[in-house]
Image: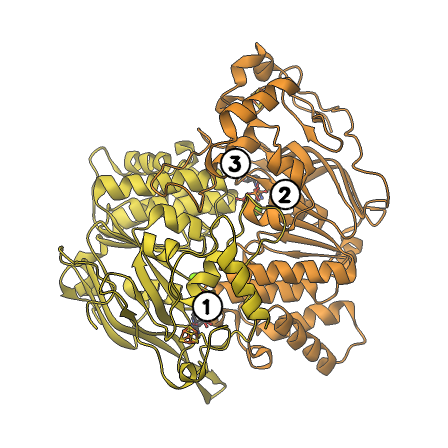
């Protein structure tokens, strides 16, 4: 199943992930209470210059995945190859030449900026750590980056606490761009931003992606943003990829029930009041003790016996790039303008 | 509170008081001409500059506006959470009939957490890393229920964790914040804010960290609790989709000022302010061309130390030249926009606003 979700791969992948897993031990005092299967066997590729979106429920393991990719977390199993090199367990020294090429933008703009450093120093840090001397000097480069992300270059000497949430996130983006990397893992990079700056940043990231050939693993919960930024999308649920495919596959003909529920739950400004969405009922399971078989079955309106006994494999139905882990995949679009499918599903759920 | 001399004419402090919203119950929260300033090395930051609004029980006010427009500073002022040494606060804040501005810190603290509570934008700064999540929620309960025993508080905390959708709440009770995902921390914080059934709940970007299915659950939860306890809710968010789903009224802020206010129907369906138009056109749509460039508002948010003269939106507004020099020289008042309860601060004539919206905006982005 190694080619899953890799449409007619012509270019060598920049990033190649196989069987990636992270299990956190949980204990009270000295007593072990088992493990949290935060990420539990992921396969996917990212080609140079490609943008892959990672979406899914809170706690499904997106951040954990992202942190493993940039080696801030040690994987429990599986392999990560970057630019042809196995970096799964690479140490600091081996990673050093790759550090420039592989950057992360963090989810939490508050926790990721050192409160005692000026913005100028924060953004200059990757340049200094990697001994990079930009033409024109560090300060000029930092001020250019501030401008690129829509901040005032005069803010160079300010401290993070003097900025609002959205402004802080742009500082993190400027920092990640400082080294002109090949791959950026962006963990919810625009979630904290208001719509206008979000539109500017998405346009900006798209421009950088096109002009510099940047590849992205783009973690986000806003599916409308992902639709505008990502060429491919992987949908995660409880530590697993349940569906992966090209943007059009995921948005126009999602096959996995969870993907369909996700799409129908997007709050739509064009509708006032709660819209006709697929309401998921049933217990949200825990990665401490994931359900047998299909992990989505406790909330799935289509679940049958086989769903509890046999784990569905992530496979392509038509030999194309769209792969789905479900025994009873759906077809066709989710609630179009008319709202038909979602309405039907709501009825099914409430039965 | 006097203004500095350098302020251009027209930008006077004595804004006419804004018409009241609707008749009926006295609003639970009434904010009148709120001003919050910070003294910084670079100068005085006018983070909130004469904002007025009301929230009745059982209603939800959505506050939207760009990053840095003063949404969080407004809510922190209501909760009395600004450091008195660094921030100066003017105007009036009535909660349940009591004026809070100038009230001793101790009394405000008593109201906070019991009568009013807040769900913060950044869950990490609100949850203490060294205590278990459950213990922090139980403590929040005991602060306002001194007679409650440990066991009762624990039970209450476990109930709340369950109600906000945390699986196996009894087991999660004993975990530390770092063992929770971002979204679960957010839910834990919501549980903490709701543990005392507050009359006024201020939710600052409560679902920003959450995926949409959980977001839908949380919004349902807030709506349920509101129906049950008849609480007044302020929902701060930059997600206009969320606003369209749950808000009754909307306040649009720009550069520390209110630029538009009205019912959700009025503000999102028949928006009157060019800034509101800009917000609506920026939203990426779920339909239509995914490769189309998004249409952000040009330029950057204003400096709150040196607000642009006149209408502070004028450097970014496409229509600033249509009013002679007025947009540059005169602060537009928040005035009735036509329909009852709908207010806007813009020098454009009402007919022109309506025409511009119809001809130039209504087909862009989600404004369509
Ligand atoms: N250090 C840790 N120790 C124990 N469990 C952890 C740790 N870090 C994360 N987890 C658990 O791993 C799971 C995945 O967490 P992760 O932060 O990757 O989720 P996420 O998909 O990024 O969620 P969100 O959208 O809320 O940010 C969660 O159940 C979380 O509680
Ligand atoms: N303690 C402070 N000292 C100086 N300036 C401050 C302080 N707190 C906030 N500000 C400034 O006040 C303005 C309003 O900030 P606020 O946090 O209310 O923005 P916001 O509308 O909540 O933005 P976001 O959507 O990014 O959260 C910002 O320009 C911010 O830099
Ligand atoms: S395998 Fe069964 S339970 Fe899982 S998503 Fe498909 S139908 Fe639902
Ligand atoms: S007052 Fe002038 S600058 Fe301000 S929003 Fe109206 S037209 Fe634009
Ligand atoms: Mg995360
Ligand atoms: Mg804020």
Q: Residues within 10 Å of mark 3 (few under 14, many from 20)?
A: many
Ligand 1 closer than 8 Å to label 1 CB:
yes
A171 in relation to A263, above or below: above
For residue B63, the mark is 2
Which residue occupies 63% across, 70% down?
Answer: B136
Q: Position of residue B316 (x, y in %)?
A: 49, 25
Residue A217 pos. (x, y %):
31, 56
Q: Chain of mark 2?
A: B
Q: Quadrant of the C terminus of chain A?
A: bottom right
Q: State which quadrant residue A143 falls in.
A: top left
Q: Residue at x 31, y 74 (%)?
A: A21
Q: Residue at x 66, y 14 (%)?
A: B9
Residue, disc 1: A59
Nearer the camera: disc 2 or disc 3:
3
Q: Secondary structure at mark 1?
A: loop
B161 or B341, nearer to the observer: B341
* Residue denoted by label 3: B367
Q: Is residue B180 left or right of residue B345?
A: left
Q: Chain of mark 1?
A: A
- Which x, y percent locates residue B7? 63, 19
Tell me if label 1 and label 2 are in contact, CB under 8 Å: no
Chain letter of the residue beneath label 3 in the structure image:
B
**Number of other residues with Cα within 10 Å of mark 2, as a class: few under 14, some 14 to 19, many 20 or more:** many
Q: Are marks 1 and 3 in contact (CB under 8 Å)?
A: no
Q: Can you tell which chain is drawn yellow?
A: A
Q: Same chain for the residues at labels 2 and 3, yes or no?
A: yes
């Amino acid at each position: 199943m190694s080619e899953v979700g890799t449409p007619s791969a012509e270019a060598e992948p920049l990033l190649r992930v196989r069987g990636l897993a992270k299990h956190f031990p949980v204990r009270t005092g000295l007593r072990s209470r088992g493990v949290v299967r935060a990420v539990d066997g992921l396969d996917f590729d990212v080609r140079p210059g490609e943008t892959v979106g990672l979406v899914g429920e809170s706690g499904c393991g997106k951040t954990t995945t992202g942190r493993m990719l940039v080696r801030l977390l040690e994987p429990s199993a599986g392999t990560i190859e970057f630019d042809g090199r196995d970096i799964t367990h690479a140490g600091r020294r081996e990673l050093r030449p790759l550090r420039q090429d592989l950057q992360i933008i963090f989810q939490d703009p508050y926790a990721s900026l050192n409160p005692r450093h000026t913005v100028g120093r924060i953004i200059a840090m990757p340049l200094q750590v990697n001994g990079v001397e930009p033409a024109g000097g560090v300060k000029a480069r930092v001020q250019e980056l501030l401008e690129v992300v829509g901040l005032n270059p005069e803010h160079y000497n300010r401290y993070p606490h003097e900025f609002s949430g959205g402004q802080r996130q742009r500082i993190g983006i400027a920092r990640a761009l400082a080294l002109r990397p090949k791959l950026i893992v962006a963990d919810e990079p625009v979630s904290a931003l208001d719509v206008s700056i979000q539109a500017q940043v998405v346009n900006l990231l798209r421009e950088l992606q096109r002009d510099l050939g940047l590849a992205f693993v783009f973690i986000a919960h806003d599916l409308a943003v992902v639709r505008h930024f990502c060429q491919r999308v992987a949908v995660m649920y409880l530590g697993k990829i349940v569906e992966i495919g090209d943007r059009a596959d995921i948005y126009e003909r999602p096959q996995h029930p969870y993907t369909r529920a996700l799409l129908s739950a997007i709050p739509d400004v064009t509708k006032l009041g709660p819209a006709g969405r697929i309401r998921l009922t049933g217990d949200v399971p825990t990665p401490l003790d994931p359900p047998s078989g299909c992990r989505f079955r406790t909330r799935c309106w289509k679940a049958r016996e086989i769903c509890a006994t046999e784990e569905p494999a992530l496979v392509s139905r038509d030999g194309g790039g769209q792969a789905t882990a479900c025994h009873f995949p759906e077809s066709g679009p989710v609630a179009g303008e008319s709202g038909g499918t979602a309405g039907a599903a709501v009825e099914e759920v409430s039965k | 509170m006097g203004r500095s001399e350098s302020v251009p004419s027209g930008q006077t402090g004595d804004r006419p008081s804004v018409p009241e919203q609707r008749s009926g119950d006295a609003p639970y929260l009434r904010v009148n001409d709120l001003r919050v300033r910070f003294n910084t090395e670079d100068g005085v930051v006018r983070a909130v500059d004469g904002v007025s609004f009301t929230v009745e029980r059982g209603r939800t006010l959505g506050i939207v506006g760009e990053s840095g427009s003063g949404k969080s500073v407004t809510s922190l002022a209501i909760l009395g959470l600004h450091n008195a040494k660094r921030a100066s606060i003017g105007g009036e804040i009535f909660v349940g009939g009591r004026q809070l501005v100038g009230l001793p810190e101790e009394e405000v603290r008593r109201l906070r957490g019991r009568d009013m509570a807040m769900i913060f934008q950044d869950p990490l700064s609100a949850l203490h890393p060294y205590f278990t999540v459950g213990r922090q929620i139980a403590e929040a309960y005991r602060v306002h229920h001194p007679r409650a025993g440990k066991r009762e508080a624990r039970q209450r905390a476990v109930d709340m964790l369950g109600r906000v959708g945390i699986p196996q709440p009894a087991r999660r009770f004993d975990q530390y914040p770092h063992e929770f995902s971002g979204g679960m921390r957010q839910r834990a914080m919501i549980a903490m804010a709701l543990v005392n059934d507050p009359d006024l709940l201020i939710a600052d970007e409560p679902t920003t960290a959450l995926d949409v299915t959980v977001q839908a659950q949380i919004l349902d939860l807030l709506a349920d609790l509101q129906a049950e306890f008849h609480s007044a809710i302020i929902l701060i968010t930059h997600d206009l989709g969320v606003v369209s789903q749950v808000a009754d009224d909307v306040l649009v802020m720009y550069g520390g000022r209110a630029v538009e206010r009205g019912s959700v129907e009025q503000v999102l369906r028949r928006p009157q302010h060019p800034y509101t138009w800009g917000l609506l056109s920026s939203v990426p749509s779920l339909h239509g061309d995914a490769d189309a460039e998004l249409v952000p508002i040009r330029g950057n948010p204003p400096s709150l130390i040196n607000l642009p003269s006149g209408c502070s939106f004028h450097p970014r507004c496409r229509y600033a030249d249509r009013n002679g020099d007025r947009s540059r020289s005169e602060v537009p008042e928040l005035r009735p926009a036509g329909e009852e309860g709908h207010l806007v601060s813009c020098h454009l004539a009402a007919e022109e606003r309506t025409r511009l919206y119809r001809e130039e905006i209504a087909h862009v982005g989600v404004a369509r």
